[in-house]
Amino acid sequence: MATKEEQPQALENKEEPKEDGELPLVVVLRPKSFNLPLEDRLQSHFHLLDPNDSPDESIESFLSRRAHSARALLCVGLTPLTADTLCLLPSLELVVGSSAGVEHIDLHECRRRGITVTGASAAFSEDAADYAVALLIDVLRRISAADRFVRGRNTILREANSTNLASSPSPSFAKPRPSRKSKSAKENALPFDLTSIPSKSKPSPAMAAKLKSPLPPRPPPSNSHKRKLSFESHGLDLGGKRVGIVGLGNIGSQIAKRLVAFGCSIAYNSRKKKPSIPFPYHANVWDLAANSDVLIVCCALTEDTHHIINKDVMTALGKEGVIINVGRGPLVDEKELVQFLVRGEIGGAGLDVFENEPDVPKELFKLDNVVLSPHCAVVTLESFAALQDLVMANLKAFFSNKPLVSLVQNE
Ligand SMILES: O=CC(=O)O
């Protein structure tokens, strides 16, 4: 997700790394289950203080005992960094975040204590933008629904073949089967004459005649069977769509760049109008929605942006409108969104994030105009390599008085 814009900024009066081999202290806060992929790189430049290395001690006791003089902290993933934890770190000057969103870091307390924060949206923005566009195309063109259809149809056909349901209507891709109607009575006759089977109880002449007659036509397939074998792919194209981007930070700007190339027109909403940006600016999201076919949500989650996409915004977006969320779940009023989708009052949604992850409202599972994804818009090998470089670059810059690489604006 886009954070408040990140720009390099010089930090004054920081000390050089120690000449005597004593490495600068860096506190690491990470979930227990999360191994640090760049641990070796970090360890060759910094002395890491990781409470997980003292599993029998509480984090509070570890930090008070060991981290009093630490000036930098690496906050891994979405580990909460609270005012209480910051209290235990009186020398802290820098928090290096490893995620694009920084709502888990108490920014207000950092500001109050004069602690600088860096984020990772610079490392993730291109992949997150690709994913937002992919979700949008998927919703418009129903790619996931088409995939489900093909898999489902193949299952039906396999079952049909194995139970010899040869009279099912042949879907266009399947090898045409000879129609039973076109066969002559002779061809359809049983392959042997039951009347010739020696039997103690020979069938009656009437029964024998019945057994020799052509097979009765099969009943027509039920509607549900038919529905599973035909795909209503009335997709919408992307070119020419009016896309409103909510949050034009690193990720939003990359989304705009991609969608311009697809022939979309772009407008945006953010806290402030950006003088260097040529796209129309809407100071409130309702206006943006009323003038858009698609809303892409990728702003930072703050008190101000919680449920920024509410009932009124969805109504303004309208029946054909599409919402894509690659930011954070609580940016969208999810209960309302579900109602709008179920009642067909909005055109579709592509959601990588949810209000109560990993829970997803079950009403969405049956909607083909909704694409669901498990919060993985930024997850690529390339973006994780870029993240490692960014973390190292910020820490090295800090300890050698150089400008930070991805500063979070914290006003
Ligand atoms: O959601 C992912 C991130 O904030 O990095």
Image (cartoon, rainbow, N blue to C red):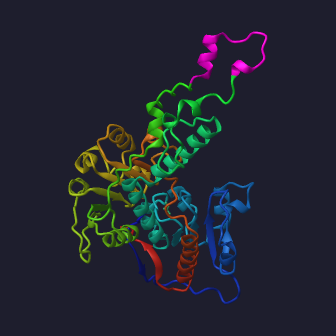
Span colored in magenta: 194-213
Placement of 203 over or under 25, stated as above or below: above
The residue lying toward the viewer, choosing from 47 and 188, is 188
Position of 134 relative to 314 (above/below): below
* Lateral position of residue 37 relative to residue 398, left or right: right
Q: Position of residue 309 (x, y in %)?
A: 32, 50
Classify residue 138 as left or right of residue 236: right
Task: State which quarter of the image contains the C terminus.
Answer: bottom left
Residue 163 higher or lower than 392, as above or below:
above
Quarter location, residue 78: bottom right
Q: Position of residue 13 (x, y in %)?
A: 49, 84
400 lies left or right of 42:
left
Q: Position of residue 214 (x, y in %)?
A: 56, 26
Residue at the image point whose x is 39% and y is 47% from the top = 369
Q: Quadrant of residue 246?
A: bottom left
Q: Position of residue 262 (x, y in %)?
A: 33, 69
- Residue 116 seen in this snapshot: no
Decide whether residue 326 is among the magenta residues: no
Residue nearest the viewer, comparing 65 with 29: 29
- Identify which residue is drawn at 46% across, 73% down: 122
